């Protein structure tokens, strides 16, 4: 199936003039692009050891009368060396626009996040998915891809049988593009992780995803963060709840900024009595209060599969923390990580959660920063760490003493710290700062 080209995309300025290049032979006239940037490496095809990727790239730049990008050349030189040594069964080109140069990993993936591919780049990404049958990971996040580019990529995935993880994060494909991806999931049976967070999805497309996932048995993780929803009836959450009652393959569900209220969390909890696959539930940045914790605490008494819950930036307060503490102390023995960051919880609720960690050995990760710490809270979490009930890497606070009094400082750990970016030093995937991904691994991580 040939990808259909989007409408012409105009020249964009980045503070300096860029000379437009000619389209490749046989390409449509609109396919003219800007000067070659890291994102342009998307069009480079793997060559035989005799010719070499770096030589191919240099020749292409000469043909287009463009300067050679030293960053891309460096990456391709590394790849050529791997190929010559016979070590390159598959290659990931890590050329994200907001990251430093990192060694090329020998996996079949491509990261061109944070560039300026736009819909024209989406056309070539679709072409790549047609021709590169070994690609299993593609990161296109924040590339100004719109609804038309989203349509191109979604339609080519109707026939693709190798891609397992696609990140479209931050591309404004809107409701129109979201509907094409939902339709794709009715046909595609190989994609396992789909990230459409911050894509301006609409109510119609969110409901479409919920409907399709009642039948799709391949998707294990989906991110639908921050859709553009209207109305106060929480219609999308109702449909997602119905989906969870029938879907028994989904492992991770991200519903950040869905305007979920107590009635919405009740819908999700009702489904979790029947669901036996979901392990990671993200309902952060919503409008859930302590009344909603009544439903969650009750379902946790019988649910034995949930391992990670992200309640960050809601408003469960002391009462909600107490509900959860009682369940985690006396009933639940499956939950491993809980984030209650910025939930207006005071000392009483925070201390109650700390007490549950003393008796519940499964409950090993807790994140509490952004609440109202008093002296009792600081002492309680300091004691937890000193007793070995809470490992320093498994929380986002660290005790320190001033004038004989204990305080808590923030530590950069969390459930998904490196969602939008990866560290520029040290290990590229740090378990302590990405506990959600470490506890509930779903396929290949970025």
Image (cartoon, rainbow, N blue to C red):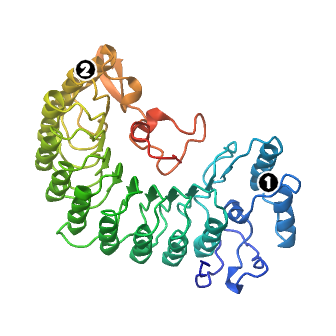
Disc 1 to disc 2: CB gap under 8 Å: no
Q: Position of residue 303 (x, y in %)?
A: 20, 41
Q: Which mark is residue 379?
A: 2
Q: Determine crowd level at label 1: few under 14, some 14-19, many 20+ residues with C-alpha closer than 10 A.
A: some
Secondary element at tag 2 = helix
Q: Is residue 236 visible?
A: yes
Identify the residue at image location x=18%, y=32%: 328
Compared to residue 254, the image places residue 330 above or below, namely above
Left or right: residue 294 compared with residue 365: left
Q: Which mark is residue 73?
A: 1
Depth order, front residue of 93/127: 127
Name the image quarter holding the N terminus. Answer: bottom right
Q: Is residue 403 visible?
A: no
Identify the residue at image location x=83%, y=66%: 61
Q: Position of residue 25 (x, y in %)?
A: 79, 80
- Please tell me which of labels 1 and 2 falls first in the chain: 1
Quadrant of the rendered structure where residue 35 is? bottom right
Pair 1/2: label in front:
1
Quadrant of the rendered structure where residue 126 is? bottom right
Depth order, front residue of 404/156: 156
Depth order, front residue of 421/437: 437
Q: Position of residue 438 (x, y in %)?
A: 43, 37
Secondary element at tag 1 = helix
Compared to residue 396, the image places residue 177 above or below, namely below
Q: Determine crowd level at label 2: few under 14, some 14-19, many 20+ residues with C-alpha closer than 10 A.
A: some
Left or right: residue 429 compared with residue 361: right
The span from disc 1 to disc 2 (Cα, nearest Å) is 54 Å
Left or right: residue 156 compared with residue 256: right
Q: Position of residue 416 (x, y in %)?
A: 42, 44
Identify the residue at image location x=71%, y=79%: 32
């Amino acid at each position: 199936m040939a990808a259909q080209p989007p409408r012409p995309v105009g020249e964009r300025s980045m503070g300096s003039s860029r000379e437009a290049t000619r389209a490749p032979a046989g390409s449509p006239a609109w396919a003219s692009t800007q000067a070659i940037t890291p994102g342009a490496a998307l069009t480079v095809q793997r060559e035989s050891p005799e010719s070499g990727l770096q030589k191919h790239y240099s020749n292409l730049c000469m043909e287009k009368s463009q300067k050679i990008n030293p960053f891309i050349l460096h990456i391709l030189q590394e790849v050529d060396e791997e190929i010559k040594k016979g070590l390159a069964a598959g290659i990931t080109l890590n050329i994200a626009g907001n990251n430093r140069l990192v060694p090329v990993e020998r996996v079949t993936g491509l990261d061109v996040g944070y560039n300026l591919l736009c819909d024209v780049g989406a056309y070539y990404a679709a072409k790549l998915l047609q021709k590169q049958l070994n690609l299993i990971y593609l990161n296109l996040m924040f590339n100004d891809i719109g609804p038309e580019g989203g349509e191109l990529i979604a339609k080519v995935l109707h026939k693709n049988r190798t891609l397992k993880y696609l990140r479209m994060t931050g591309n404004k494909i809107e409701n129109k593009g979201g509907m094409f991806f939902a339709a794709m999931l009715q046909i595609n049976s190989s994609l396992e992780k789909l990230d459409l967070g911050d894509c301006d999805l609409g109510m119609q497309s969110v409901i479409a995803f919920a409907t399709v996932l009642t039948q799709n048995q391949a998707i294990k993780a989906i991110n639908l963060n921050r859709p553009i929803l209207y109305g106060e009836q929480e219609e999308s959450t109702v449909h997602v709840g119905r989906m969870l009652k029938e879907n028994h393959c989904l492992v991770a569900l991200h519903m950040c900024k869905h305007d979920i209220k107590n009635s919405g969390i009740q819908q999700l909890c009702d489904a979790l009595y029947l669901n036996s696959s979901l392990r990671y539930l993200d309902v952060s940045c919503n409008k859930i209060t302590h009344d909603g914790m009544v439903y969650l605490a009750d379902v946790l008494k019988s649910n034995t599969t949930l391992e990670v819950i992200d309640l960050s930036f809601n408003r469960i307060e002391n009462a909600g923390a107490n509900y959860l503490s009682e369940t985690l102390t006396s009933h639940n023995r499956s939950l491993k990580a809980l984030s209650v960051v910025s939930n207006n919880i005071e000392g009483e609720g925070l201390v109650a959660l700390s007490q549950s960690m003393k008796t519940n050995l499964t409950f090993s990760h807790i994140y509490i920063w952004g609440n109202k710490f008093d002296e009792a809270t600081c002492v309680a979490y300091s004691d937890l760490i000193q007793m070995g009930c809470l490992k320093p890497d498994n929380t986002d606070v660290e005790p320190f003493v001033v004038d004989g009094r204990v305080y808590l400082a923030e530590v950069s750990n969390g459930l998904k710290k490196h969602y939008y970016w990866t560290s520029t030093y040290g290990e590229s995937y740090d378990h302590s700062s990405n506990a959600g991904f470490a506890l509930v691994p779903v396929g290949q991580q970025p």
